Amino acid sequence: MPKVTIDGIEIEVPKGTTILQAARMIGKHVAPPAMCYYSKLKVSGGYCRTCIVRVTKGSAANPTPMPKPVASCRTEVMDGMEVANYTSEQNLIDRKGVVEFLLLNHPLDCPVCDQAGECHLQDLSYENGSANTRYDFDRRSFEKIDIGPYVQLHMTRCILCFRCVNTANQLTEKRVHGVMNRGDVSEISTYITKSIDNEFSGNIIDVCPVGALTDKTFRFKSRVWFTKPVDANRECKKCAGKVRLWFKGEDVLRVTGRKDQWGEVTDWICNDCRFEHKRYSDWNIEGPSHIDHHSVISQNHYELAKLKLDTGKQLKELKSKKQVDKK
C-alpha cells in the first residue's frame, strides 16, 4: 500500500485513496475543508477548490513537486508523496483567494438565514477567509421560484457545489432539477412546471453546505443553538428510520438525517420521516446527539451540561469517600 506524508505525518493507505481521504484518516487537524466533496455520493468533488493542497513531492519514483495547487478530493495518493496543507503559508493564501471567490456573489445574509450556526461557508470564511472584500460590483440576483412544498430555494446563496444534483441522481430515478445555463448566470432550477416532490427530496436540504436549500417547515422558527438535538428511530418501510430530532421545549421543530464528524449524512431518510412525524410519540428516543465542541450548537448543549453535572457528583463522592477513609 502507498505511503503519503501530509503536514509531516506519514500514513499508509489503500491504493486509489485520494489526498483528502488520507488526510481525514489522520484527523481534522490535517484534513482540508471541503464544500463540494461528499463521501456518501458516488460522484462528487472537483468543483469548489477549497480543498486545494501543495504537493511538495510527487512520489518516491518521481520526487518533482507539482507546480500548482491540486484539488485533494480528486488527486490520488502516490507512494512516497509529500503534501503540505496547513504547513504551507502559500497554500493558505491560495485558499483564502478561493474563499473570496465563493463569497463574491453570496448575499451574506446570515442574520436571517436558517442555516446560520451550522453553515459550512460560515466556518470556511471564518477559518480561511479575509476580513475585507475587494469586490465593488453588484452581486448576482435571481428570480424566486417555487420548487415544491418542502424545500425552499434561495439561489442567491448557492455556491454551485452540485451536491443536491448528485444526491438526486443517486437517490431518485427521475431527477427534475439541475444546473441551468453557464458562467455567472448558472443556477439550480427545475424543469418547466416541475416541483421536487419525490420521496427522498428532503435529503438535498441536508447535503447543502450553505443556506441555498432550507426546510420550509422550519423557516424562522428558531436558531439551531437554541434547540436540543436528539438521536431517535422508528420503523419505516422506505428508509432506515434513523434520524436526529431538534427539540425546543417539548416541540419537535425539525427532523434531519444524522451526520458524522465531517458534516455528512450517515443514513438517507425519506420525506415521511422528515416532514410527517414531528410528535414525540412517533419516535424511540436513543439519547442526546453528540455535538462537536467546536460547533456553536454545543455552547448550550445539555449533553455537555450533563457531563459537567456527573463529573461534579463524582468529585463530591470521591471527596466524601476520602474523608471517611481518613476517619
Image (tube, rainbow, N blue to C red):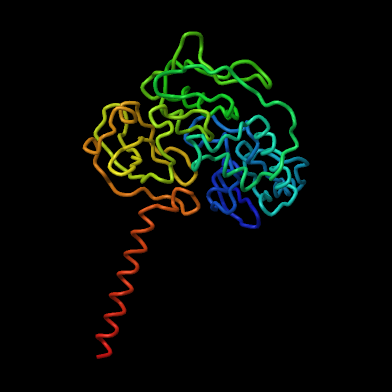
Q: Residue at x 36, y 45 (%)?
A: 229
Depth check: 109 or 247 in front?
A: 109
Name the side, left or right, on which 153 lies relative to 316. right
Q: Is residue 27 above or below residue 138?
A: below
Q: How many marks?
A: 0
Name the side, left or right, on which 54 lies relative to 28. right
Q: Residue at x 39, y 50 (%)?
A: 290
Depth check: 70 or 284 in front?
A: 284
Q: x and y percent of residue 308 in the render? A: 37, 63
Quadrant for the C terminus in the image: bottom left
Q: Quadrant location of residue 234?
A: top left
As drawn, the residue found furthest toward the bottom would be: 327
Q: x and y percent of residue 230 in the render? A: 33, 45
As drawn, the residue found furthest toward the top would be: 192
Depth check: 123 or 144 in front?
A: 144
Q: Quadrant location of residue 141?
A: top right
Q: Residue at x 30, y 77 (%)?
A: 318
Q: x and y percent of residue 310 in the render? A: 32, 65
As drawn, the residue found furthest toward the left would be: 281
Q: x and y percent of residue 78 in the render? A: 65, 44
Q: Is residue 205 above or below residue 172?
A: below
Q: Residue at x 29, y 33 (%)?
A: 278
